[in-house]
Amino acid sequence: MIGKDLEGKVIVVTGGAGLLGSNFCKSIASEGGIPVIADINIDEAKKCEDELNHELNLSCVDSIKLDINSKESVTNAVEVILEKYQKIDALVNNAYPRNKNYGNDFFKVGYNDFIENVNLNVGGYFLTSQIFANFFKSQGYGNIINIASIYGVIPPKFDIYNNTEMTMPVEYAVIKSSIIHLTKYLAKYLAGTNIRVNALSPGGIISQQPKSFIDAYNKKCLTKGMLNPEDIIGTLTFLLSEKSTYINGQNIITDDGFTL
């Protein structure tokens, strides 16, 4: 009998109660892993834990409060998870914190808001990566996957936002491109430690966008167009599994050709 790809692996997913995070955790559990929903909103994390365990008829999904911008919170999470499971196999950096003014048009973005949002995200990914990598070194192995974006790879295709109230926030482009390079830096820095660091860059994910935007976006793709969360979990599972042992320092794009 063929085993599941993530059998017994303890995998921490930051922002695990969100749209992508919850689907990541569902996939991890389905592949035999133990997903830990690590979210700043512990009530949502607990709710997601209960829903996934019920849906999958399992009891392996776990949750913990984690603020990626707090050294104390991240350190405590590592200690609690380690005490419970005696190991941590991987970290999926997926959280996306932002302030109340996030997402304005370029000329309306305030300097302080720009700095705060970049710091929240890039700083948070740095902090979680630093603390988990330090633990992984002592453990003797580890795996970090940073969730980036196609807009960390290419400039925005602004025309698809025409006739909508949407825009592609400048903070998002800066954050996601920084995360991709942080990934490469860490992979090189941690060479020889048995710790892999890769990034996953999804294309657009369907989430109640207006039809005009989705139609314009789809024309830039090759087959399906905008993706559902389920469409990128195969890539994540692969990066978390032993099948990708020698993939390190890479950014894997899953976007139905949008970046071409």
Image (cartoon, rainbow, N blue to C red):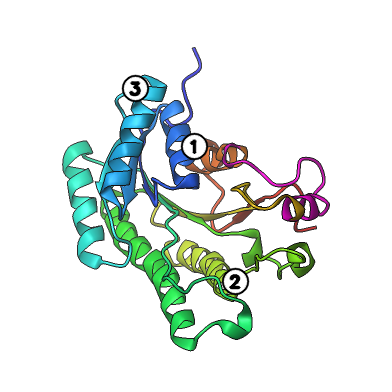
> Above or below — where is 222 with respect to 62?
below
Residue ID for mark 3: 58
- Answer with the quarter of the image where residue 86 lies: top left
Provide the residue span drawn in magenta: 213-230
- The residue closer to the viewer here, 257 or 137, is 257
Q: Quadrant of the C terminus?
A: bottom right
Q: Secondary structure at mark 1?
A: helix
> Above or below — where is 113 with respect to 77?
below
For the residues labelled 3 and 2, the Cα–Cα distance comes to 39 Å
Closer to us: mark 1 or mark 3?
Answer: 3
Crowd around label 2: few <14 · some 14–19 · many ≥20 (10 Å): some
Q: Residue furthest bottom?
A: 111
Residue ID for mark 1: 242
Q: Amino acid at mark 1?
A: Glu
Residue 260 visible within the image: yes
- The residue closer to the viewer here, 55 or 251, is 55
User: Magenta segment: does it hold 80?
Assistant: no
Task: Give the mark nearer the N terminus: 1 vs 2.
Answer: 2
On the image, the x and y values in percent for residue 166 come to: 65, 65
Residue 197 appears left or right of 254: left
> Above or below — where is 133 with respect to 171?
above
Task: Give the mark nearer the N terminus: 1 vs 3.
Answer: 3
Q: Secondary structure at mark 3?
A: loop
- The residue closer to the viewer here, 111 or 30, is 111
Crowd around label 3: few <14 · some 14–19 · many ≥20 (10 Å): few
Q: Please name the residue shown 34% across and 22% down the image.
A: 58
